Amino acid sequence: MTHQYRQSWTVAKKLDLVKELNSTDFEIVAPERSSPINSVVEMVVPPLVGQVAASDMMRLLEILNRDDIRRVAVCGEGGIGKTTLAMNLNNTLRINSPNSFDIVIWVQGSRSLDLSTIQSQIAKRIHLKVEAGDTTHSIASGILERLKLRTKILLILDDVWENIDLDAVGIPSRDPCCTVLITTRSLDVCKHMAVNLSFRLDLMNEEDAWKLFVESVGPVVHSDGIESLARKMAASCHGLPLAIKTLGNSMRGVSLIELWQNAHRTWRCSSRLFSYIEQEVFQHLALSYYSLPSKDLKQCFLYCSLYPESFSINVGELIQCWVSDGLIIENLTVEETFKYGLALIKSLEYLGLYLDAAEGTVKMHVIFRELAIRLSQREKLLGFHSQSNPPSYKIPNKSSKRVSFMCCKIKNLQTFPEFSQLTVLFLQDNPIKKIPDEFFHKHKYIRVLNLSKTQITFLPPSFRCLSELRSLFLRDCPIEELPPLVSLGKLVVLDLSGTRIKALPEWLGSLKSLKELDLSCTHFLARIRTGSISGLLSLETLNMSCSAFNWNLRAADQGTTLDELLRLDQLSSLHIRLDSVEFLKFASSWLKKLTRFDIQISLGSHDSHHHVAKHNEKRLVLRGVNFLQEDLNDLLHKTGSLDMLACVGMSQRHWLSLSSLTSLNLSHCDVVTHLISNKRSSPGMFLNLQHLVLDHLQKLEIIVEGTIPRGKCFRNLKTIQVSDCPMLKGVVSHAMLCHVKNLEEIKASGCENMSCIIDSGDHEETLPSLRVLEIHNMANLRSICVGTSVCPALQRIEVSCCPELQELPLSISNISSLKEIRGEIKWWDNLRWENDDAKNMFLQYFQANPRENCSRKRKYE
């Protein structure tokens, strides 16, 4: 009893600090870090094919190295490969010529590109903070001030349709330090932008075109009877790369000669569909559309034409729209629907009709978007109407079924003619303040309505007429209150994220078909009426991350209690913030059935920086929890991602329960001295762990203490990030080294007593997968490796404010993989090398960081 009393007393003292910590706005994930700006951001792009493309690349590199040329244009028709060439150039400058330019800035253009969009992209690239009220003039001044600090700049403007005033943007275009490269279809653009040199891309010759076609189709192209047809089809593309790849992708893996014969016949007939100047392009691209196996898949392809050029489309929202519009069967669960929709997207990506973009998004190539618009105009029965050149705003015709006016700068919404067939209406990203009272009386059959990022503060009375509505998106609208919408009995998706809604009304519980409710970032939500949640019998997904609403087990002034959640038998995905762990113990068995959760235990206000869990992730965030007093083993066993801030009382049995864990973040847990020791280890500990973050652990001395038996421990670990752990002597100890053979990234910052990063002892050890080393603010760091450690796969090393570090773990074997070394010039000059030849060999990879104030803490992004 005495021992338990003392232990509890110690824990109580530690918990006294939690109140102070809770008054600070900590981020739950690792602290935000502001890393230096990379000179070149590598882009995902297919390699260039053929001698002509290689010649164009060499020519472009030579031109960019000339001092007498400041503006260069790459011209050519749509689909000829201008963007592919420019993206490959970008990557080449990163890999092979790291000292050519101090910074390369990529701006993605489109037909609707405007000054503010260009400035926004550049500001993001150079880490320039832009406030909501900043004018284009003030932003231009900020951009100019930042760029003038650079010695040599390359600005790449891709897909330019009209003259751009570079001075108005803030580009020092007349300064000898600045070179501008544009890609465009228009010679007028070249003239108006006063380019010094322009060259048109040549079409592929017959040999290169055939090579590209074979790469796209695969080895089946060489089969008997197929090759002759294939050569005819490839030759008919007249050397246009996009047409060749699209045609090839549509026939990839097709081995039946009858299907090739039919495709050839279809291609020959498709030419009459187009009477435009570029019909020789579109007649080939259209074959991919006509070869799609189902009408639904064709409509899914056309659907993306409703979004603006180069727009990153959220995959989850796109699938929600497809389901609500009847393109995907409705009687699937949310999870099943997502998987089915994702399979459709991957099919379209495989054929080259969609572009894989940032995580969770897709894009449509500008040529394919134009193709989709033309096809939808021809096939009027499908009824797609999209503004191809915002901010124009034309009233669609009466046959339109799916209408998009995204980003058209509409302030006053006009009354449309009566649309008896309208099922989809996109009005998002417009400064609309009011919808006419009678507007929806004429559009009773709308199934998908998106009003996100408009300025409406209320919904009109006619909104109640939308009895067929399936998806309603009001994201980031300043709306504060919902009118009674009991008539929306078929509503499946309701997105109120980022709104100013203050209370959820009781009638919400009458929406018996609702499957997905998004209340994330509802910072004003204070009350949820009793019955409004428990009545949602079909609800499968509830997202309340970063919401101000405070859930309680017992009845309180805010209305509903956590009991209402327990009545949702269909719920499979939950994002929620709680003020205690009591609910987790109370509902442990209920939580186990969830396929995805993101639960944050956090005393105090909502955290606006809360990291959103990835799809299918089970994430638990604990803040100020005493594990000696709480039994969370069952829940921990199911958790995939765990964040602990200012927690105490973790013991071996808790660590052993984390068998499913893939991500662990420990922050401000001052009692932690080590993570694993030979006295309390198991070969299966952290079996699935991939990402480890250790932040502000004041007593952490070592991650793995002593020698632990070889087993499966840490075998899947990919990244380690440590920051502000003053007692930590190293990141990867000798005992740990043999267990982390799959480690890819090490990031360390602010560990003032750390003398080395990797300790391999007396034996030569290899980290075969290590690609990235980032080290900042380590005043006493003297070496990266103690002993002989081999890191053959290193691609990037970044060092700042480490004055005692004088050696790098590099040898001749690193030449094939290394891409970049970043650091201060003074630090680089003081590095010790085996000889001058070695230093000169690696000099080509060095990029100088701007001079920094090492007294401030660096922060990772």
Image (tube, rainbow, N blue to C red):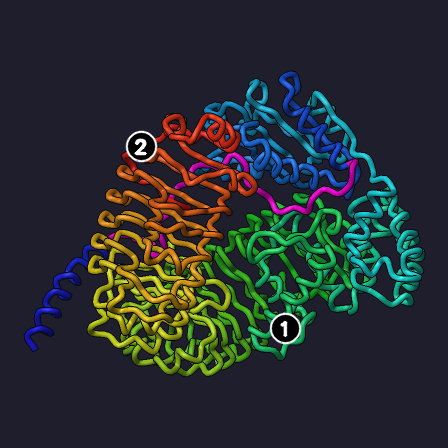
Mark toward the start of the polypeptide (1 vs 2): 1
Name the kind of residue labelled 2 in the image. Answer: Pro
User: Residue sitting at 87 percent across and 61 percent down?
Assistant: 223
Front one among 255 and 157: 255
Magenta residues span 23-52
Give the image location of residue 722, x and y in percent: 33, 50
Q: Is residue 485 above or below residue 176?
A: below
Q: Is residue 526 visible?
A: no
Asked whether, in this view, residue 629 is left or right of residue 712, the answer is: left
Q: Secondary structure at mark 2?
A: loop
Q: Is residue 536 above or below residue 789?
A: below
User: Residue sitting at 33 percent across and 45 percent down?
Assistant: 786
Q: Is residue 45 magenta?
A: yes
Asked whether, in this view, residue 496 is left or right of residue 186, the answer is: left
Residue occupied by mark 1: 468
Give the image location of residue 834, x and y in percent: 42, 31
Circle 2 Cα neighbour tier, 10 Å, few/some/many (<14 / 14–19 / ≥20): some
Q: Which quadrant would residue 229 be assigned to in this image?
A: bottom right
Image depth: mark 1 or mark 2 in front: 2
Q: Marks 1 and 2, how far apart in space?
A: 67 Å
Give the image location of residue 501, x and y in percent: 42, 62
Which disc is residue 803 wearing? 2
